[in-house]
Image: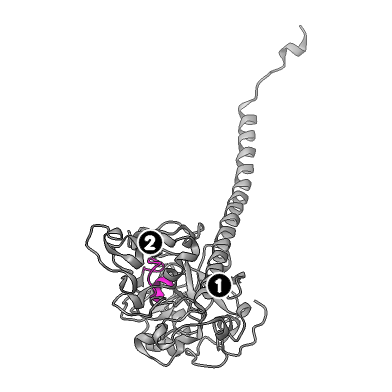
Amino acid sequence: MDDRRLRRTAFTLIELLVVIAIIAILIALLLPAVQQAREAARRTECKNKLKQLGLAIHNYHDTFKCIPMASGAHNAGWNGSGGRRQSGFVGMLPYIDQGPLYNMIQTGGTNAAVNGSTNYQGNAFVPWDNNHKAVRQQIPLLLCPSDGDTTDENPRAKTNYRLSRGDTAWDHNPNWNGNGGRGLRGFFVGGNTNTGGVRRFRDVTDGLSNSVAMGERIKAKAGSNSIRTGAITKAVPQSQYRGNASLCLATVDGDGVYNSAVYRRNGNRWMDGAPIFTGMTTILGPNAPSCMDSRGSDWYDGIFEPTSHHTGGAQVLLGDGAVRFISENIDTGNTTQGSPTNGPSPYGVWGSLGSIAGGDTVGDF
């Protein structure tokens, strides 16, 4: 008999298991590369959205000869109960292809009402009123795809992008509390046009290319105590970390979570100018903890640093429209210092990027 007829034509069990094991190893090696490619694409999309917002700021400035106010009705100050809390995004709406939404806010009435119970409009628009359609209107441009959805505080629409208040932990809204003008050091200021509380490009004497205008921050997550998603409260009185920013660092355990009560409203209202919703600071560095006043109300000042799901740092928009990735290891100088009122920032390169007129010399970043 021909020996060739006796040769087997199928795999043995051991051979089959070896083939399966090899395939599993190849898939295991491939998956991280696929995930990295997807995150790279999401990070690029986040970057492009920041660039679009930078273009909107410049178009707004071309029209009104000023930068949108971080908090205050852009066309008439903070008249009315809600006007002083309108974020800079409200004024930018016509420049990000949201003209109809802007008109809805200005005209109000039944067209803007969810159930016919609201009359807030224009300068009196209240950005926390769930009965106003604008409060529920999610703008895709304001969301970074690297950050997932959140179940907190629905149905209010959210944002991953924040307006820079500079290298100060307080007085972000000087016309509310008048604590010495510390909040006037950032690219965006809370104020009103009646008292001159607006910012113009000519005021950015440190240079538009050396000044942070906006940054990204992960939205609050239900049940999360992570330093990247929330802000700690009831741990350190605001008066203390105003004088020593490093006290905020001590509120974090070694595993990257807060060791006390957390306020989970970061980014949960794109239309609200209160710092917890749309503000950011340049004090402790990207992906560092954030701290609020110990009383815990959402309109208080504090430290609100950029955070992201991008490895090693977060992206920021500079005043000239460029977008840069800032390492979480950027020089932050002497964080035991308190919030400055004038002159160079004590918080190293990072603080200098937040201060627009401190006379800082910005090095590599």
Q: Is residue 160 magenta?
A: no
Measured along the vertical axis of the image, is residue 285 above or below residue 229? below
Horizontal arrangement in the rendering, residue 316 relative to residue 250 (left or right): right
Horizontal arrangement in the rendering, residue 138 relative to residue 13 (left or right): left
> Which residue is disc 2 drawn over?
157
Q: Are the residues at dot 1 and dot 2 in contact (C-beta closer than 8 Å)?
A: no
Instruction: Give the overall secondary structure of the magenta segment.
Output: loop
Horizontal arrangement in the rendering, residue 25 relative to residue 124 (left or right): right
* Residue at the (62%, 80%) spot, across then down: 210
Q: Which residues are magenta?
A: 264-278
| Tally of marks | 2
**Residue 63 in view in this figure:** yes
Q: What amino acid is at disc 1?
A: His
Mark 2 lies on a secondary structure that is: loop
* Residue, far top: 1
| Neighbours of disc 1 within 10 Å: few (<14), some (14-19), many (20+) | many
Task: Give 84 or 171, whichever is nearer the viewer.
Answer: 84
* Residue at the (38%, 66%) spot, across then down: 268
Measured along the vertical axis of the image, is residue 246 above or below residue 229? below
Which quadrant: the N terminus?
Answer: top right
Q: Quadrant of residue 208?
A: bottom right
Q: Quadrant of residue 202?
A: bottom right
- Colour style of the rendered protein structure: one colour
User: Residue 58 shows which numbered tag?
Assistant: 1
Which numbered disc flags the more N-terminal residue, 1 or 2?
1
Q: What amino acid is at disc 2?
A: Ala
Q: Position of residue 175 (x, y in %)?
A: 37, 86
Task: Give 203 or 160, whichever is nearer the viewer.
Answer: 203
Q: Position of residue 60 (x, y in %)?
A: 51, 72
